[in-house]
Every structure is written in structure tokens, then in C-alpha cells.
């Protein structure tokens, strides 16, 4: 090809001149050391959550805007809590997608928010690559955090899952991790695969029918299984993904019933995995579709711990990105 | 009538196999002499020495959006034809994706009027094969032809059903009209914006599978065989499509095919990091597809390179990848890109030039595209040793959507002539 694409590090835009985080757009493109730093920082913030005054002053005087172009309860509220525990001022903006497509363009809206001196955007958007686009469009010094973009990535979710895994398993090197369900539409699955690869997991499996798998998914370094029993065999970690009801209409699946029969995580099915395997779900759950209540609420489930870890991980990422931007600005000013 | 002589250039014309130092002699709008000696009694009013430069037939583009009528915020005849002559493009054919759609003689005549008022390059129109490109009712194809349309097309819009598609071909065939088919299965392409493969999967962008194209190519070829219509397929983007066309040509079908410049230059690797400058339709595919397209040109399976010039306003590009409008503004860098391609991808420049001059001229049914006595004096003078760096300020097209802005390209068009007139650079520019 004529265009020089080789040797170009992927998602380099999210790092500053010293290789520190300044945006958090994707797990792809981040090295193991940086991911470990995020986990360690998050671990130190967990303690903040148990204090009587749950605040640290790292983002004091900074304004964080939560830009949610897609509905979300858990992610938006944990980002809000994380920002507040870092002492930032928080602006919550929920934008109905249809309203923006008809009216003001995304870039005009950003200009307006920047005029209000926002220091950090936390963005969730239905289109893959939206946070990348915003990161290229904002003024220098403003940080962008991806809170989920289309089918692309949900990097903070992946990091809170990694933190949860580390808390239970101590590390990643010998782990077999199985991700079950709608991989095709899942940004969580993509971010988790990148994170597990970077952290050195022994084996990453995806379990789904071909209609719910991205083309050439093997190229991401995973093993593909189309049956649950085989895919779960001796797994250390099982991640089930939410199945959207719309998937029945797009000729991707015959019925919820058949999906449950083949891929629903039940206590019986979990017996294929290792006895000490943990079960995770990014939420919100469809009980009786992708997961049984007995598993979701059972001893192996760490689903609520994931939520708690979400706040600490988001505090870590926000504080790291803000200081990376401040360093980048200082370097620019020094030139 | 003005008589001009272009002296001492490298006359490079794939149509006549000409590649030697010599002169062009022009009388009025025609070439009256090509070679060393002027025709007897020829006295030039002006002589231009182009020693060391290449003299090429003017490029003939079978697909360039000029955006009028209806999309003047994206471009106008004035802006886009200035870009054309700056790029050495002397004939452009504009598709019917205008507003209103060019499905009637009235719109075709409006396009003809705009072309006449603007001057610069020659402009031909493609008409819509169905009313409003809706895929339901036949358009008045005979009237479109009478108004100067060189062919009819439904672009990528689907037909309501295969019966209507077949009827369209039958009707076009009975009036000796070439059908331009942009093969893409609408349901398989659906919301896709990039090649369906590993990169699309990783970026979480909806893909357009190769089968969206190959299935449609097969369908068009089957119906063309049934109806005996003259079919021009393209732009093609997949290796398998080239095979299908090769086979159809071997069986003697009246089929020709084109490829868009971007699919020869780039691959899906360019869309990493959501680089929407490379959002085009058909999508950029794998390197092996690009190589198969180049082979298709070398073997003559692919007859034509189109610029697929699609200028856009800035606002159309300031959005997340899937929401940007596809297309590149291509006219003014076309020759430079081909020169670069010939150097980097081991393909003879003459092959690329033939597919951009005499190839499309033949498909259009108008002929020309050659440096021959008696032909229209449409040509450019090209300096292959010079370099240039396009910048937004000097950019002629209203669409600044080109990945080549602020990058150095080889080869500069120093002059363009249309119908014996020097249209670029002009004194007023």
C-alpha cells in the first residue's frame, strides 16, 4: 500500500510525550506496565471508599462533564461518584441521541462546553470511535475518558474487571478466561480481550454462535468455542455478557429460549469450570437469559464487587489522565 | 482560429502506443499534427516549448460528483471543474445523485447549461435508470440519452426486485444505452462503513462483507447475459469481483469494469484509529484485493480508473467515523497519485494512464482520449520530476477531504488544454 501505516503505534493519541495517560480511549495501545499502574492506583483508592470522609483533593477545582449520549445508570453514577470523591465539580449531561442527530452537531456541542471551561469529558456514545474523534477535536489540556463507544471499547469496565480478577486470583499469567455471549456487539469483550492479552493471561476464550462473533475474531488472540461446556472447561474466570432483546429481530438468534439452552450460565454448566472459578457480568443482567439467578447470586459471583471496584478504577483513570494532561501542557509551555 | 504548437515534449499516449519526443500541432479545437513535423502549410500563432515534460491525453473521468444541482454547499461546477483542469482532467462524467435526481431531460439540460457556462473541462452526465433512483419505475432513458447522457445507473440504490432490475436492462439494451452498475447488495452492506474483516472487528465498526459486492456482481452479470445489455461495472473493490469479470469477458459478455483510485492506493489498514479521511465506498479492502485490482488493470480485465471525486463540506467530516460522509476529493491529485502508484507498486504508468484516458473514452461511447491527428486537442503537460504539497489554501475543490493535503506528491500538471484552448493555468487564476 502507498500510505505509511507501519510502525504507527495504535491509539497513540491517548498518551503524552512521557508515555503517561492523558486520555483514556482504549485498552488497545496500552502497555502492561500502564495497566498495572492503573490497577495499583485503583487499589489505593479503594481505601478512600471506606473512610468516613470519602474524598481526596486530586481534582479540586477541575470540572468534569459526563456526556452520555446513551442511557446508563451504573457507569454514569460510578463516574459521577468517582469525580466527586476526587473533589471535582461534576456536570451531568444526558443527551438523547436522536436530538443531537437532528440538531446541534457533536463538535458544536463540544465547543460550547469548552467555553464553560470543562477540564475533562467522560463520554459514552453509540458510535465506535466517538471518544477518539472528541480527543482530536478538544483544545490541548482537556482530557477525554471513554465510558463506552459503540461496539469498540469500554476500557474502564475492562480495568475494573481486571482489578476484580486480580483481587481473587492474584495475577493473570496462569488464567483461562472465558467470555460468553454476544461478543459481536460487546465493547466490554473487546476491551477485556486487549487487557487480558496485555496482562499475559494464559488463554482467552470466546463462546458464542457465529452470528454473535465478529469476523476474524481469532486475530485478536482468542480461541473460539461454539458450545458452552467445552468453552467453560477448566476456566478460572467466566464473564457473561448482556444479551439485548433486539438481537432476536436481526436474524442473529432464533429465540431467548434457545439462547438460554445453549449459552445460559447455570449452576450445572458452571461445573465444567474450575471449582474456584469466579463469575462476572458487566450488567445490567437478564436473569434467565444469559445467566441464572442461582449463579448471579451464588458464591462464585463477584458481580457486586465489580461495581464497587468501578468507582476506584474510575478515580484512578481520571486522576492519572488529568495529571498526564497537566504534564503535557507544562511541556508545551516550556518549549 | 488559433494555431498552436507544443514543442519538444515526451508524447505519451497509450492508445496509439506513442512514447517519444515530439510536437503537437493544434488548429482550432483539433490536433492536426502529432510527431516531428508540422502538417504542410502549418504556421503556429503561438509556440510553447515543453522540453523535459510529458504531454498526456487529458484524463477522462467516468465518476466525479460536481454537486450541482442541489448540493452547492459541497461544491459547484466552478469549484470542481477548476480542480479538474488543475489535475489534467479534461472530461468528467457526473452521476445522477443530484437534487433533483438527474432522471429527466430537464435536469440533464440544466447540467449541460451549467457545463457550458463554466467552460473548463467537458462535462457529461449519467442519468438515473429508475425515476428518482427509487428502483421502482423506469426513467425516460431515451430522453436522457437524447439530452446527452452517456449511460444510466441506479448507483448503489437497490431495485425493488429482480424483475424491475431485468426490465431496466432490457429497456436500456433496446435503445443501445450503456448501464453503469455499482454492485453492492443493500442488505449485506446495510449499516456497514468499512471492509468486514479483522480491523473492522477490532474497531467495532460495522463491516461491508466482500460478498456484498461479489453477490451483486454475479447478479448483474447473469442479467446482462440474459438481456445482452452493454454493462459497465464498478467501482469494484474485491479480488473475487475481478475474477468474475475476467470470466464474463472470456465468455464474451459486453461487460467492462472500473476501479476507484482510492482502492488502488490504500487498504483497510488506513482506517486504524478511526481515520475518517479513508472512509470511502466501496470500502478500502485488504492488500490482496488491492493487488488483484492492479493485476486486473495490467491484464485489461479492468478497463477504467475513476477518480470517484466526492467533495464534502467540513461539517460532513467532523463526526465519529461511521457518521462522516464517505468520499475523497480526488481530481486535482489524480495524476500525481498515479505517478506515485507506478513507482511504489510496480505497475507501468502507461497502464494507469490508458485506464484513465482511452479506456473511459471507449466506455463512454464518445471515443477520443488519444493524441491522434483529427482528435480533440484535450491534453495536459505534466512535469514528473517536480513535487508539490497540496495545501487547503491552494486547493481548488470546495471539498477539502483529501488525505494528501499537506503531504508531498510527485508530478505537477503545468498546463491543461481542452478543445485547443489553454484552460489551466489561466491568466485570471
Image (tube, rainbow, N blue to C red):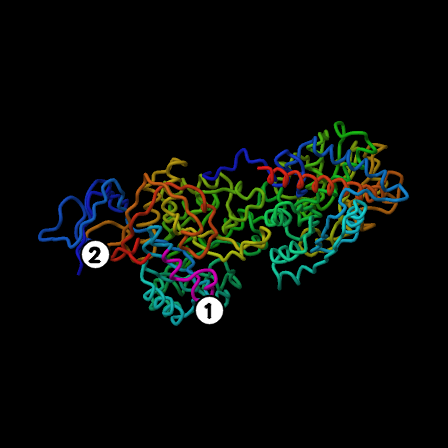
Residue located at (86% from left, 47% from top): A293
**Quadrant of the snapshot with the N terminus of chain B:** bottom left
Residue located at (73% from left, 50% from top): A64
Tag 1: Cα neighbours inside 10 Å, few (<14), some, or many (≥20)?
A: some
Residue interval drawn in magenta: B67-82
Q: Residue furthest bottom?
A: B106
A147 shown above or below A104: above
Q: Which residue lies furthest to the right in this view?
A: A52
B180 shown above or below B70: above
Residue linked to disc 2: B30
Q: In this view, does A157 lie to the left or right of B394?
A: right
Residue linked to disc 1: B100
Q: Is mark 2 on a helix, strand or loop?
A: strand
Secondary structure character of the magenta stretch overall:
loop
Residue located at (66% from left, 48% from top): A151
Instruction: Out of A54 and A176, give the one closest to the viewer.
Output: A54
Instruction: Out of A331 and A269, give the one closest to the viewer.
Output: A331
Amino acid at each position: 500500500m502507498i500510505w505509511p501505516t507501519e510502525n504507527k503505534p495504535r491509539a497513540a493519541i491517548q498518551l503524552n510525550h512521557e508515555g503517561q495517560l492523558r486520555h483514556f480511549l482504549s485498552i488497545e495501545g496500552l502497555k502492561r506496565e500502564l495497566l498495572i499502574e492503573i490497577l495499583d492506583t485503583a487499589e489505593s483508592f479503594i481505601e478512600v471508599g471506606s473512610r468516613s470522609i470519602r474524598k481526596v483533593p486530586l481534582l479540586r477545582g477541575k470540572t468534569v462533564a459526563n456526556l452520555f449520549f446513551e442511557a446508563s445508570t451504573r457507569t454514569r453514577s460510578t463516574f459521577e461518584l468517582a469525580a466527586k470523591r476526587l473533589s471535582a465539580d461534576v456536570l451531568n449531561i444526558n443527551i438523547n441521541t436522536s436530538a443531537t442527530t437532528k440538531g446541534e452537531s457533536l463538535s458544536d456541542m463540544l465547543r460550547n462546553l469548552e467555553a464553560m471551561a470543562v477540564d475533562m469529558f467522560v463520554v459514552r456514545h453509540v458510535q465506535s470511535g466517538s471518544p477518539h474523534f472528541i480527543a482530536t477535536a478538544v483544545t490541548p489540556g482537556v482530557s477525554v475518558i471513554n465510558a463506552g463507544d459503540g461496539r469498540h471499547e469500554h476500557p474502564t469496565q475492562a480495568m475494573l474487571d481486571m482489578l476484580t480478577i486480580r483481587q481473587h486470583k492474584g495475577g493473570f499469567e496462569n488464567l483461562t478466561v472465558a467470555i460468553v455471549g454476544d461478543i459481536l456487539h460487546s465493547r466490554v469483550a473487546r476491551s477485556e480481550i486487549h487487557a487480558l492479552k496485555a496482562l499475559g493471561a494464559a488463554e482467552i476464550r470466546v463462546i458464542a454462535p457465529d452470528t454473535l462473533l465478529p469476523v476474524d475474531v481469532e486475530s485478536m488472540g482468542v480461541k473460539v468455542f461454539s458450545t458452552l461446556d467445552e468453552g467453560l472447561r477448566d476456566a478460572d474466570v467466566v464473564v457473561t455478557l448482556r444479551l439485548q432483546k433486539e438481537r432476536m429481530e436481526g436474524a442473529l438468534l432464533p429465540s431467548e429460549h434457545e439462547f438460554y439452552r445453549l449459552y445460559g450460565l447455570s449452576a450445572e454448566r458452571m461445573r465444567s469450570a474450575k471449582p474456584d472459578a469466579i463469575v462476572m457480568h458487566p450488567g445490567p443482567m437478564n436473569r434467565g437469559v444469559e445467566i441464572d439467578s442461582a449463579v448471579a447470586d451464588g458464591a462464585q459471583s463477584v458481580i457486586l464487587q465489580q461495581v464497587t471496584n468501578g468507582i476506584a478504577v474510575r478515580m484512578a483513570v481520571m486522576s492519572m489522565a488529568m495529571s498526564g494532561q497537566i504534564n503535557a501542557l507544562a511541556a508545551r509551555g516550556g518549549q | 482560429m488559433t494555431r498552436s504548437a507544443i514543442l519538444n515534449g515526451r508524447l505519451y499516449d497509450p492508445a496509439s502506443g506513442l512514447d517519444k519526443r515530439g510536437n503537437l500541432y493544434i488548429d482550432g479545437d483539433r490536433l492536426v499534427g502529432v510527431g516531428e513535423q508540422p502538417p504542410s502549410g502549418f504556421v503556429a500563432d503561438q509556440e510553447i516549448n515543453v522540453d523535459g515534460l510529458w504531454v498526456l491525453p487529458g484524463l477522462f473521468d467516468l465518476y466525479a460528483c460536481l454537486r450541482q444541482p442541489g448540493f452547492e454547499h459541497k461544491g459547484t461546477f466552478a469549484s470542481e471543474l477548476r480542480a479538474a483542469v488543475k489535475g489534467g482532467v479534461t472530461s468528467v462524467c457526473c452521476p445522477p445523485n443530484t437534487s433533483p435526481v438527474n432522471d429527466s431531460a430537464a435536469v440533464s439540460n440544466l447540467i449541460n447549461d451549467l457545463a457550458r457556462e463554466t467552460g473548463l473541462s467537458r462535462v457529461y452526465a449519467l442519468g438515473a435508470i429508475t425515476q428518482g433512483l427509487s428502483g421502482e419505475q423506469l426513467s425516460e432513458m431515451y430522453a436522457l440519452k437524447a439530452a446527452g447522457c452517456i449511460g444510466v445507473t441506479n448507483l448503489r440504490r437497490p431495485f425493488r426486485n429482480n424483475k424491475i432490475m431485468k426490465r431496466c436492462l432490457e429497456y436500456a439494451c433496446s435503445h443501445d444505452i450503456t448501464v453503469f452498475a455499482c454492485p453492492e447488495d443493500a442488505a449485506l452492506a446495510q449499516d456497514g462503513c468499512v471492509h468486514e474483516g479483522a480491523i473492522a472487528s477490532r474497531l467495532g465498526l460495522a463491516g461491508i462483507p466482500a460478498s456484498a459486492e461479489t453477490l451483486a456482481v454475479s447478479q448483474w452479470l447473469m442479467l446482462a447475459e440474459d438481456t445482452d445489455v452493454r454493462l459497465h461495472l464498478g467501482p469494484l473493490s474485491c479480488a473475487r469481483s475481478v475474477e468474475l469479470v475476467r470470466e464474463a469477458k472470456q465468455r464474451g459478455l459486453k461487460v467492462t469494469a472500473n476501479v476507484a483510485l482510492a482502492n488502488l492506493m490504500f487498504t483497510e489498514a488506513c482506517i486504524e484509529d478511526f481515520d475518517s479521511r479513508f472512509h470511502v465506498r466501496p470500502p478500502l479492502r485488504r492488500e490482496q484485493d488491492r493487488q488483484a485490482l492492479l493485476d486486473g488493470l495490467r491484464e485489461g480485465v479492468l478497463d477504467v480508473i475513476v477518480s470517484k471525486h466526492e467533495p464534502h463540506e467540513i461539517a460532513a467530516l467532523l463526526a465519529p467515523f461511521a457518521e462522516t460522509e464517505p468520499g475523497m476529493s480526488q481530481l486535482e491529485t489524480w495524476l500525481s497519485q498515479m505517478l506515485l502508484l507506478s513507482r511504489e507498486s510496480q505497475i507501468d504508468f502507461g497502464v494507469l494512464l490508458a485506464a484513465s484516458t482511452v479506456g473511459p473514452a471507449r466506455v463512454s461511447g464518445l471515443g477520443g482520449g488519444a493524441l491522434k491527428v483529427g482528435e480533440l486537442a484535450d491534453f495536459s503537460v505534466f512535469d514528473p520530476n517536480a513535487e508539490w504539497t497540496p495545501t487547503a489554501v491552494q486547493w481548488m475543490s470546495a471539498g477539502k477531504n483529501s488525505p494528501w493535503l499537506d503531504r508531498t506528491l510527485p508530478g505537477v500538471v503545468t498546463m491543461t488544454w481542452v478543445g485547443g484552448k489553454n484552460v489551466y493555468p489561466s491568466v485570471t487564476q
